[in-house]
Amino acid sequence: MTPIEFAPKPAPTEQTEPFWRAGLDGHLALQHCDACGHIRYPVSTICPVCLSPTATWKPLAGLGTVSTYVVFERAYDPSWADEVPYVVALVELDEGPTMLTNVVQIDPAAVRVGQRVEVTFIRRSADAVLPQFRPTDRDAS
């Protein structure tokens, strides 16, 4: 499948590059504070819990639960016109952080709060993938 070019494209920085590279490698990774273990999302230079500046990037299971969502019936950026209707959701990852993302591979009318989802990576350009989530039948851990 040819990637759908879209704008705005992710603009990796030195700080966020490991997040985007992990996606290109097919897994979801976030910073884990070296001092207290808190998983940082969004990415930051210091831990919001203990203020430590050190962290290690580690992969996550990529499983979570839809905590809320909205179905977009209109594309607010022309690059999303072919995606309408699409779901924008807050997904609470099993490890704790909540991500703003899309729920894909399901009829938008079938998405539900409490629904279990797993990460999937949708290629949006030659050098960028977006972590999005699709329904799963796996039970919560």
Image (spheres, rainbow, N blue to C red):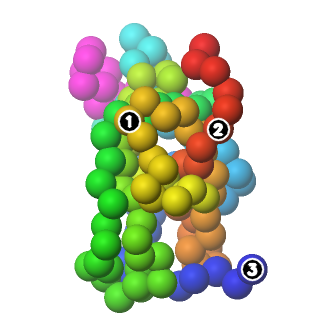
Q: Is residue 131 visible?
A: no
Tag 2 or tag 1, which sits nearer the N-term?
1
- What is the CA distance from the residue labelled 3 to the residue labelled 1? 31 Å
**Residue type, numbered disc 2:** Thr
Decide: marks 1, 2 in contact (CB < 8 A)? no
Outermost residue to the front? 109
Real-space Cα separation, disc 1 to disc 2, in angstroms: 14 Å
| Residue 17 left/right relative to 141 | left
Q: Which residue is mark 3?
A: 1
Q: Residue 4, percent across and down?
A: 57, 82
Q: CA distance from mark 2 to mark 3?
A: 23 Å
Q: Earlier in the sequence, mark 3 or mark 1?
A: 3
Residue 33 pos. (x, y %) = 42, 22
Q: Residue at x 57, y 69 (%)?
A: 128
Do callouts 3 and 1 mark residues in contact (Cβ within 8 Å)? no
Q: Quadrant of residue 14?
A: bottom left
Identity, as a three-letter code, of the amino acid under mark 1: Val
Q: Which residue is mark 2?
A: 136
Residue at coordinates 35% horizontally, 88% vertically from top-left? Answer: 78
Q: Which residues are magenta?
A: 46-56
Mark 1: secondary structure: loop
Residue visible at 49% across and 22% down?
Answer: 95
* The residue positioned farthest toward the bottom in the image shown: 78
Name the residue beneath numbered marker 1.
113
Q: Nearer the viewer, residue 78 or 136?
A: 136
